[in-house]
Amino acid sequence: MHYDAIILGAGGAGLMCAATAGQAGARVLLVDHAPKAGKKVLISGGGRCNFTNTGTEASRFLSENPHFAKSALSRYTQWDFLELVQAHGIAWHEKTLGQLFCDDSARQIVAMLLDECAKGGVEVRLSTEIGEISHADGIYRAAGATAPALVIATGGPSIPKMGATGIAYDIARQFGLNIVPPRPALVPFTLGDDDAAFRDISGVAVPSVASVRGKSFEEASLFTHRGLSGPAILQVSSYWAPGAPVTINVLPDAGAKLRDARKRMPRAGLKAALVEHLPKRLADVLAVRIALPTELGNASDTMLDGVAARLENLTFHPTGTEGYAKAEVTAGGIDTAALSSKTMEARTVPGLYAIGEAVDVTGWLGGYNFQWAWSSGVAAGQAIAARR
């Protein structure tokens, strides 16, 4: 069977690429080893799919080349995808920080993408192994088919229980493309025995500003039985490197709050002041760790300033992360230096494309990675149709 393009991977990026190319007249085969299309889409956003973010811009993506994503993101924007969602009658709502979700179910997004593929006459083969991939005389062979174009849309190794693997990197290396070392991203941290008291308050969440290596995010932090999680922590995890400390500001303007407490309840201890602003279990742990050695009324400004500094820069030294099993996405991947930012085609291998999570472009938490899937998929799909 001969096609204009074989797309490997029926996730968000692969579906979008297939629909775009198919509707532009290309004959497309979309292949996935999974029994269902869009498996990550289906579980995302608590089953309601955080399908894009109104604040999407290239600065909110990590890459060895921070400029690479600009072209695709500017040519197929969050507003373009939202228009598609609305055209399919999918009800949606906006949560904090520009995050857009389905009112009902993530299944609606997958159904929409499959419908768009059907409109383009895309042949979708699920539960199908890719098999050996070869390339000769301008023709790619994979999954029992041939085509002058091959798209790597198989994602990264995050969430292996869903069948995720690093096959994208194997295929890329087969064709001489470099790989930026992949690592888990948007992933919880693990803490060691020195921080066991924080593991013991599993389930406690607090508004915070989490920081690592000069990057900060203001969202909730969550203490878990293994370490740290929550939106702020997941965000900074993408910027973390082994050995780097993670700081959390759990009480902004702590100095003023402590002085106020000293004035109102001079005979109280530190814990009483903390409980006014923090969950009791966290206040208990912090009061022991910081250990103000006197009643508030006897504490000098210098002493309170020292306590405030620790509350505003609560420092942890993670022993690691919870790895790909708990990572929402994979950072790193196929080196963007090998690809055209306009078409996603490999510069040295005509007809070979790479899109979505397989590429070294990783978005913040909050719908950014799906928008990259849509934008990069459209870029490659348009290029495939144009080469016919």
Image: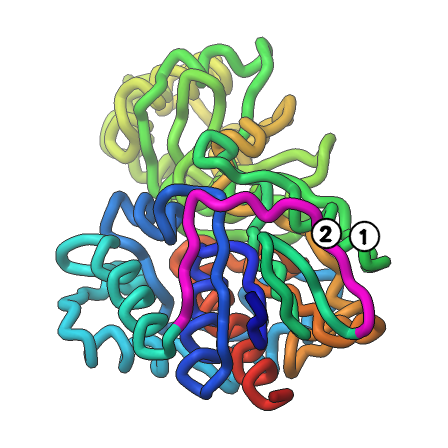
For the residue labelled by badge 2, is the local secondary structure a helix, a strand or a loop? Answer: helix
Q: Mark 2 highlights which residue?
A: 171
What amino acid is at disc 2? Ile
Q: Quadrant of the C terminus?
A: bottom right
Q: Residues within 10 Å of mark 2 (few under 14, many from 20)?
A: some
> Between 124 and 368, which is closer to the camera in this rendering?
124
Residue 310 visible in the shown view? no
- Image point (46%, 12%), residue name: 197
Does residue 23 sit above or below 85 in this rendering? below
Span highlighted in magenta in the image: 122-137
Q: On the rendered structure, is 247 left or right of 271? A: right
- Image point (44%, 36%), residue name: 162
For the residue labelled by badge 1, is the local secondary structure a helix, a strand or a loop? Answer: helix
Residue 221 percent coordinates (x, y): 40, 37
Q: Mark 1 highlights which residue?
A: 174
What amino acid is at disc 1? Gln
**Quarter location, residue 193:** top right
**Quarter location, residue 366:** bottom left
> Between 95 and 380, which is closer to the camera in this rendering?
380
Does residue 248 sit above or below 330 in this rendering? above
**Quarter location, residue 323:** top right
Q: Quadrant of the N terminus?
A: bottom right
Q: Main secondary structure of the magenta part?
A: loop
> Between 15 and 139, which is closer to the camera in this rendering?
139
Pointers 1 and 2 in contact (C-beta within 8 Å)? yes
- Image point (40%, 22%), residue name: 224
> Between 113 and 103, which is closer to the camera in this rendering?
113
Residue 208 percent coordinates (x, y): 41, 43
Does residue 38 sit above or below 336 in this rendering? above
Queried whether the magenta region covers residue 316, the answer comes back as: no
